Amino acid sequence: MNIHTTSRGTARLRLTAAVAAPLLLLSVACGGGDDNASDGKDEVASAPDEPTADEGSGKDKSEGEGKGEDSSKPAAEGKSAFYDAQVKYVRCMRTKAGVKDFPDPKLSGYLNWPEIDKVVDPKNGGVEYKGGKDGVCVPELQRAMNLEPERDAQKDYESMLAHAKCMRDKGVSKFTNPTMSGGKVLPGGDPSPGNPALDPNSPAYKQAREACKGKLLEGLDGMQ
C-alpha cells in the first residue's frame, strides 16, 4: 500500500508518532485473522461478554463496585475501554470522515488494518490511515490509543525482530531490524522511508508479508 511515495507502515508510524502513548512510538499490515466486522457499516459491533466503558471516562461503570472481584477484571475493563474508544473512532471515520465502509475494530480493540486497506482511495492521499481529511478524527484516535492496554516493549521488539528476519529470509533483503531506544520500540522495514527503497505492492514483498505475518504479535500488524 503506497500513498504516492509513502508506504503504509511509514504513514501509520507518522500518525502514531503524533498521537501514541509514551510506551511505544507505534500503534498498529501484515496480520489479523480474528476479524469481526458487522454486516452493516452504519453500526459497529459490540464486544460480547465485555463490560461497557462509561461514556467519555474511559473506565467501566462497575469499576470499584463490589468486593472479592476476580483478579482478571481490571484487564477486562481495560480491554473494553480500548475497544469502546476504537468504536467511537470508527464511527467518526464513517460519519465525519465520510469513509462509510470503514471496518469495525477487532474484538481485541485493535484496528483491522487488512480490511482498512480495502477501503483506501488512492486519490485521497491515504486519509483513511490518517484519521480522515485534515485529521478530523485524530482526537478520537488519540483517545483510543491512550487506552491501549500496556504492552511489553521487549516482547514487541522480539516479535518485530523475528518478523524482520523472516522478511529478509523470504527475499526482501533490505528490510531492516527494529531498534530499542529509551525503552521504546522503533519499527524496522524500509531503510529509507523518505525515499522508499522497498515496494510493498511488489509480488515478492506481498508474498513475504503473507509468509511472515504470523511473527507479529497482536497490535503490531502494519507497523513494519
Image (spheres, grey):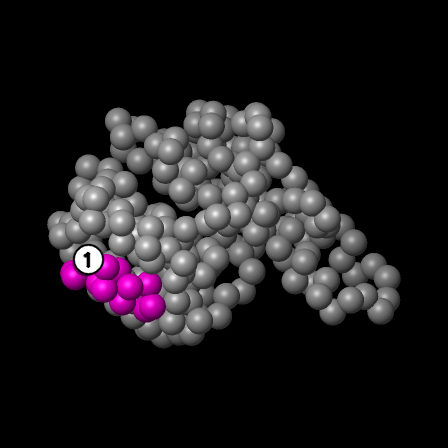
What is the magenta range?
A: 161-174
Up-down relation of residue 108 to residue 215 (above or below): above
Q: Which residue is mark 1?
A: 172
Which residue is located at x 16 percent, y 61 percent? 173
Query: Looking at the picture, how far across and down is residue 75, in whole percent?
Result: 65, 62
Q: Position of residue 72 (x, y in %)?
A: 71, 66
The overriding secondary structure of the stretch rendered in magenta is: helix
**55 or 9: nearer the viewer:** 9
- Which image quarter: residue 78? bottom right
Give the secondary structure at mark 1.
loop
Residue at the spot x=27%, y=41% of the render? 1
Displayed quadrant of residue 116: top left
- Decide whether residue 3 is among the magenta residues: no
Q: Residues within 10 Å of mark 1 (few under 14, many from 20)?
A: many
Q: Amino acid at mark 1?
A: Val
The question of residue 170 being in magenta is answered with yes
